[in-house]
Image (spheres, helix red, strand yellow):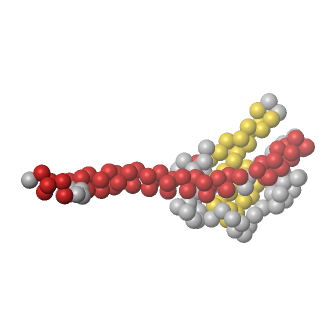
Amino acid sequence: MQRALKSMKGFTLIELMITVTIVAILAAIAIPSYLNYTRRAYYSEVVMATAPSKLGVTECFQTIGTLTGCSSGANHIPAAIVSATGAVASLSATNGVITVTPVAANGILATDTYVLTPTVTNNTLVWASSGGGVTNGYAQ
């Protein structure tokens, strides 16, 4: 009897079922987290694309003293992006307000826009972000 027990090797069915259950639970948690991570990483390119226009609007405001006229292609602000470049489908600035439409990819929709709105406070610009991308949590 002792010899028969020692020669039996392997896993029982219950051990295999427990292992598969644990792997399934980990996958159920990890996959949505990974997808959210990739969306946010892709959307960060949309947010970073606003940097030159944001700098241009700030310089325009400091030069002329108002946001009126601080639009794409004028007063030190880069020209609008009208054809897809990377993750950005279009980018424009109108009277200081910068609007970016992303390319629909990696779980991001074209409606997940990113809008930067400047407000003059103590003769400096304070930026507020809004749009579908901010609402969905892809950007702060």
Residue extending farthest to the bottom is 83
In the image, 71: left or right of 108? right
Residue 138 image point, x, y percent: 57, 50
Residue 111 image point, x, y percent: 57, 60
Residue 51 image point, x, y percent: 76, 50
In the image, 73: left or right of 42? right
| Foreground residue among 103 and 127 | 103
Residue 25 image point, x, y percent: 34, 51
Image quarter of residue 65: top right
| Foreground residue among 137 and 26 | 26
Image quarter of residue 17: bottom left
The answer to whether residue 132 is visible is no
Residue extending farthest to the front is 3
Residue extending farthest to the right is 63
- Residue shown at the point (88%, 41%) measured from the top left: 62
In the image, 22: left or right of 7? right
Residue extending farthest to the left is 1
| Foreground residue among 68 and 53 | 53
Where 58 sits versus 19, above or below?
above
Image quarter of residue 126: top right
- Residue shown at the point (30%, 56%) measured from the top left: 20
- Residue shown at the point (76%, 54%) measured from the top left: 93
Q: Quadrant of the C terminus?
A: top right
- Residue shown at the point (82%, 44%) measured from the top left: 58
| Foreground residue among 24 and 103 | 24
The answer to whether residue 52 is visible is yes
Looking at the rendered structure, the number of numbered marks drawn on it comes to 0
